[in-house]
Image (cartoon, rainbow, N blue to C red):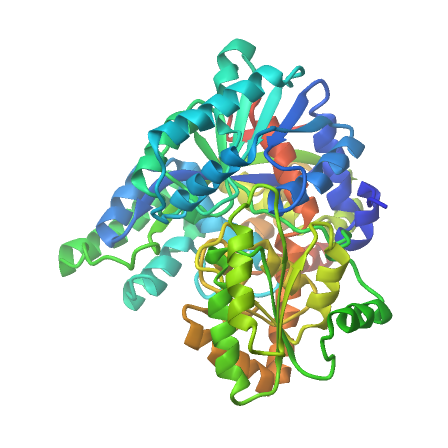
């Protein structure tokens, strides 16, 4: 069952929830429409599936639409995604025309438009063409790493972004020189979701048994989509450097998103790389395997996030919330979640990752201290209630232009 | 006499899209950004560190020390006495004086940080909300002080004085109107920047208790 907004009082306190009701009250008469490209799989769909019902419970008139497209469109948007990450994959002008055409077709299909259109990520970005006709407010929310995009794709998207009223980025490093207002909003995790809620020990054990993982041997885990940018092969190499000295297991687990056709190819490569090791578990899980992922994280000794590029890297916050020591790459939004040697470990190389896995396995008390600090940091900064507050303020800021806004 | 109505405030952080990779660019940035940006970079740490004071009390000092490795200059910027200023533009000028001195004396103003470690100018927009707490006398005021969040305390002490340009904190203004001039003056003279917010709460509560 989906948690109710008042269920969060026990975690964050009454005052935070009361403030959310007050902010929602100020939005009376304003409708809000979220639009993205996939109903499940991936961080954006996941957070929307939690945020939209909670906002509705607060009394906000909000809904969520998903654009429709064939696989070909998602192959192109994957290329756009990679080029935004600075990866030089070929992308033709014809493909960009097709991208715009599918956006146009979707704009014609949408029957009901709101006062505020909240577009997530590049896939539906060109819907903003409708702004002139609808004369409403448009927000573009960028969930991905924008720090070093290929120039051509940036020029292409910049023209579109600047048609919006406001853009939203997940980390200061993604900020660009734009003519429109840029708001900083960290993403968040839901402490009451299947992915993060407390679990019974019996269930965790059942999941380990199901996959044949030995609970007596240290478990090193990386949870992520099968994507080159998550560097799963690098994780296997780091693990092998550790395995020479310490008998441990590696779990690489993740689901697939509808808009990520490249995943199958990466999964095959990872399986081939891991084939010779019985202690490496490559688990491709269905998109709704939240309880299993939660159990795998809770059973882990150390959790890794060895991404080469990252949007925000919410799996880091999830691991920290479960009070696990985390070793993660210093990319994207990860340094905002981990202060090195205080709430986790930040690394830059495969060798560095291997070194820290060994150290944390040998120093469990230090690992526990990192984990405790990490959970406290997530509690204060990365829970869904803070995210809801930021979104409500964002909508209010579309109608209030001063630096100081009194909501009496 | 109007009761004291405790308010709180929520922050929306904005990215200005402006960066600096060396002291020269930081100087130019500080000169041009809106006052809300100078305020943000010198105050946001106060609410993030509830129980302990961070080593670097403002973002400029942190960046100068960690990304440029300039420890002496970092310390000079960290030591700027914010409480001395009742206007953000005076505070801005003080930072410019320190950085300007460095540029003039060392000629090292163009030594740059690593790529992706640039200073990123941010700013903030403030939403002010009422809380259920109201006080009509000193006893009620004391009770409220014990219950309000650190964000409410922050709003009435820091925001009111510098950002709302009242030149004094809200508590002292109300207490003075209520006829408690001596207590008002004692609170006015506290340098809030040298306390954590929980430490500041305790200090003000003690001042009120002693006065009573």
Relative to A366, A97 lies left or right: left
Label tally = 0
Name the residue at 73% across, 84% down: A216
Q: Is residue A300 or residue A267 the one in the foreground?
A: A267
The answer to whether B212 is drawn above or below residue A323 in the figure is above
**Furthest residue toward top:** A133
Name the quarter where the C terminus of chain A is drawn: top right
| Spot occupied by residue B85 in the image (x, y as percentages of width and height) | 41, 46
Pick the front one: A370 or B82: A370
Answer whether residue B179 is visible to the viewer in this image: no
Q: Is residue A314 left or right of residue B66?
A: right
Looking at the image, is A37 positioned above or below residue B105? above
In the drawing, does residue A49 fall left or right of residue A130? Answer: right
Going 55% across and 59% down the picture, which residue do you hit? A267
Toward the bottom, the furthest residue is A245
Q: Position of residue A128 (x, y in %)?
A: 50, 21
Above or below — where is A102 with respect to B12? above
Front residue (pair B133, A353): A353
Could you tell me which residue is drawn at 71 percent across and 18 percent down? A29
At x 63% / y 18%, what residue is drawn? A110
Q: How far from the left and from the top, in percent, is residue A63?
A: 71, 27
Q: Is there any visible trace of residue A380 in the rendered image? A: yes
Q: How far from the left and from the top, in percent, is residue B149?
A: 70, 49
Relative to A1, residue A111 above or below? above
Q: Which quarter of the picture shows residue B35?
A: top left
Of residues A268 and A367, which is closer to you in this image? A268
């Amino acid at each position: 069952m989906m948690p109710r907004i008042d269920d969060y009082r026990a975690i964050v306190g009454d005052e935070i929830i009361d403030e959310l009701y007050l902010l929602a009250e100020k939005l009376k008469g304003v409708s809000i429409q979220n639009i993205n490209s996939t109903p499940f799989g991936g961080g954006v769909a996941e957070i929307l599936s939690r945020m939209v019902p909670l906002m509705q419970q607060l009394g906000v008139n909000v809904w969520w639409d998903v654009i429709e497209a064939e696989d070909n469109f998602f192959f192109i948007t994957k290329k756009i995604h990679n080029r935004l990450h600075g990866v030089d994959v070929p992308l033709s002008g014809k493909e960009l025309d097709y991208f715009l055409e599918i956006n146009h077709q979707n704009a014609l299909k949408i029957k009901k438009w709101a006062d505020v259109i909240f577009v997530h990520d590049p896939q539906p970005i060109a819907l903003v063409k409708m702004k002139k006709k609808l004369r409403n407010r448009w927000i573009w929310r960028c969930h991905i790493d924008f720090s070093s995009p290929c120039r051509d794709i940036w020029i292409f998207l910049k023209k579109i972004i600047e048609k919006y009223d406001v853009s939203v980025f997940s980390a200061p490093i993604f900020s660009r020189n734009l003519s429109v207002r840029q708001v900083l909003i960290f993403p968040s995790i839901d402490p009451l979701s299947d992915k993060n809620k407390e679990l019974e020990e019996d269930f965790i054990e059942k999941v380990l048994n199901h996959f044949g993982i030995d609970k007596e041997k240290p478990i090193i885990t990386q949870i992520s989509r099968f994507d080159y940018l998550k560097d799963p092969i690098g994780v296997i190499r780091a693990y092998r450097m550790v395995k020479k000295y310490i008998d441990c297991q590696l779990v690489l687990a993740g689901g697939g998103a509808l808009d990520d056709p490249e995943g199958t190819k990466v999964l095959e490569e990872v399986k081939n790389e891991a084939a010779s090791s019985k202690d490496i578990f490559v688990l491709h899980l269905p998109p709704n395997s939240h309880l299993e992922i939660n159990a795998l994280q809770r059973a882990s000794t150390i959790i890794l996030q060895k991404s080469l590029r990252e949007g925000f890297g919410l799996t880091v916050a999830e691991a920290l919330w479960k009070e696990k020591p985390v070793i993660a790459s210093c990319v994207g939004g990860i340094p905002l979640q981990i202060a090195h040697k205080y709430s986790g470990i930040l690394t830059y190389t495969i060798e560095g990752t291997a070194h820290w896995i060994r150290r944390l396995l040998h120093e469990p008390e230090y690992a526990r201290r990192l984990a405790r600090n990490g959970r406290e940091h997530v509690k204060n900064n990365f829970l869904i209630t803070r995210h809801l507050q930021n979104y409500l303020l964002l909508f209010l800021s579309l109608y209030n232009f001063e630096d100081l806004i009194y909501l009496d | 006499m109007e009761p004291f109505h405790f308010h709180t405030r929520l922050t929306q952080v904005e990215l200005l899209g402006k960066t600096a990779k060396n002291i020269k660019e930081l100087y130019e940035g500080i000169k041009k950004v809106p006052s809300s940006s100078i305020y943000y970079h010198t105050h946001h740490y106060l609410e993030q560190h509830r129980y302990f004071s961070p080593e670097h009390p403002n973002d400029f000092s942190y960046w100068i020390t960690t990304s440029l490795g300039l420890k002496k200059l970092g310390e000079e910027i960290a030591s700027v006495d914010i409480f001395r200023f009742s206007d953000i533009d005076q505070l801005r000028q003080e930072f410019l004086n320190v950085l300007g001195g460095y540029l003039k004396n060392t000629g090292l103003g163009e030594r740059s940080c690593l790529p992706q470690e640039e200073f990123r100018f941010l700013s903030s927009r403030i939403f002010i909300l009422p809380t259920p707490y109201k006080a009509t006398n000193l006893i009620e005021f004391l009770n409220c002080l014990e219950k309000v969040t650190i964000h409410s305390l922050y709003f009435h002490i820091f925001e009111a004085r510098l950002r709302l340009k009242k030149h004094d904190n809200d508590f002292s203004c109300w207490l003075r109107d209520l006829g408690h001039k001596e207590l008002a003056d004692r609170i006015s003279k506290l340098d809030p920047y040298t306390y954590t917010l929980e430490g500041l709460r305790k200090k003000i509560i003690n001042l009120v208790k002693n006065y009573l």
